[in-house]
Amino acid sequence: MTEREQKNPEGVGDVVEGLDELAKEDNDEVCFGDVLDKFGSRSFAPLMMVFALIELSPIGAIPGVPTFLAVCIAIVAVQLLIGREHIWVPGWIENRSISNDKMSTATDKMSGIADKLDSIANNRLSFMTSGKVAAAVILLLCIAVAPLELLPWASAAPMTAIAIISLGLMVRDGLVMLIAYIVAILATTGGLYYFFGTGGSGGSGGDGGGFLFF
């Protein structure tokens, strides 16, 4: 990883902007070590948001990617839950990469999501922005991703909730986090009921061409 100016994001737009800056550097690919370097080893919420936003982009349609990203989020959430001050990720995650072209395409798609999420954020009910509670909820959402991935785009529901919870942590907006918790319960419960209750299954859609995870 090269030395780069760290970004202290204050919203989803700042996170997307940071990813776009990485995609425009003089490299052929962006690895997750670069992302950690960009946002800093204390940026638990921004890093979890990065993984969630990537899943919500077209990259998330590639089979296996939602589950992989859920594992990455879970690793960060566990560290937030136990009170670590710095993020550690194993080398096999840190070295995984995405081509610059795919990252640029993803950030273009993320911009609309960023604008919508940032528009709902404000500094409200900050006493409800407990990092440990948020981490525990995020871990439960991560567990739901693997079975939901078998249904087309169903894993986007828990990932959207994770992105909103991460936003709430970043801007200390307890109301946003409360809304995200409700959305998470409804969407994930509905998806899991459909999957296990009806025996439904399906592919994630999309093809994996050009993605460097696998």
Image: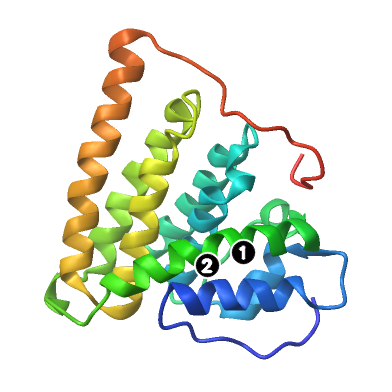
Classed neighbour count for the residue bearing mark 2: other residues with Cα under 10 Å, few (<14), some (14–19), many (≥20): some
Give the quadrant of residue 60.
top right
One can see residue 128 in this view: yes
Secondary structure under tag 2 reads: helix
Q: Which residue is mark 2?
A: 111
Q: Which mark is residue 108?
A: 1
User: How did the renderer colour the structure?
Assistant: rainbow
- Look at the picture and state if 64 lies above or below 126: above
Q: Amino acid at mark 1?
A: Asp
User: For the residue marked with disc 2, what is the amino acid?
Assistant: Ser
Where is residue 187? Give x, y as percent.
27, 37
Could you tell me which secondary element the residue under label 1 belongs to?
A: helix
Q: Nearer the viewer, residue 50 or 207?
A: 207
- Asked which quadrant contains residue 5, the reply is bottom right
Q: Quadrant of residue 39?
A: bottom right
Between the C-alphas of marks 2 and 1, the distance is: 6 Å
